[in-house]
Amino acid sequence: REALSDRRDVLVAWFLSMSGERLAAALPEDWQVFAKSYGVLINMIAWHEGMHAGQLTVIRRELGLGPKFG
């Protein structure tokens, strides 16, 4: 979890360093299937994290474990 947290901090810092123009700029063509711009990529990453959190919830339930948080 420490490594994931570190990478997330780097990612957040990278996005915060971008100007509005950069956030509106188109992503390279091979990334267009994920998001059209850097700004939209932020939303896709948030959705992606949420998807995996849901997957972990299902796995925990199947293993008979309770919620990790809350």
Image (cartoon, grey):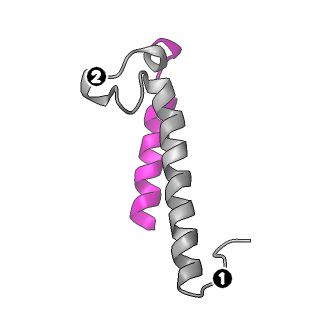
Q: Which residues are magenta?
A: 1-21
From the image, state whether disc 2 or disc 1 is nearer to you: 1
Give the residue at mark 2.
Answer: 28
| SS state under label 2 | loop
Could you tell whether 34 is left or right of 60 in the image? Answer: left
Looking at the image, is mark 2 or mark 1 earlier in the sequence?
Answer: 2
- Can you give x and y, in whole percent of width and height, for residue 62 in the image? 54, 81
Please tell me which residue is depicted at 35% across the width and 30% down the height of the picture.
33
Quadrant of the drawing holding the C terminus: bottom right
Label pair 2/1, CB-CB below 8 angstroms: no
Quadrant of the drawing holding the N terminus: bottom left
Residue type marked 2: Pro
Q: Residue furthest left?
A: 30
Can you tell which mark lies on residue 66?
1
When the figure is inspected, residue 69 is found, relative to residue 44, above or below; the finding is below
When the figure is inspected, residue 24 is found, relative to residue 14, above or below; the finding is above
- Can you give x and y, in whole percent of width and height, for residue 43 in the image? 54, 35
Crowd class of label 1 (few under 14; some 14 to 19; many from 20; radius 10 Å): few
Which SS type dominates the magenta stretch?
helix
Viewer-side residue, 3 vs 27: 27
Residue type marked 1: Gly
- Can you give x and y, in whole percent of width and height, for residue 11 in the image? 43, 42
Could you tell whether 4 is left or right of 42 in the image? Answer: left
Could you tell whether 28 is left or right of 39 in the image? Answer: left
When the figure is inspected, residue 53 is found, relative to residue 64, above or below; the finding is above
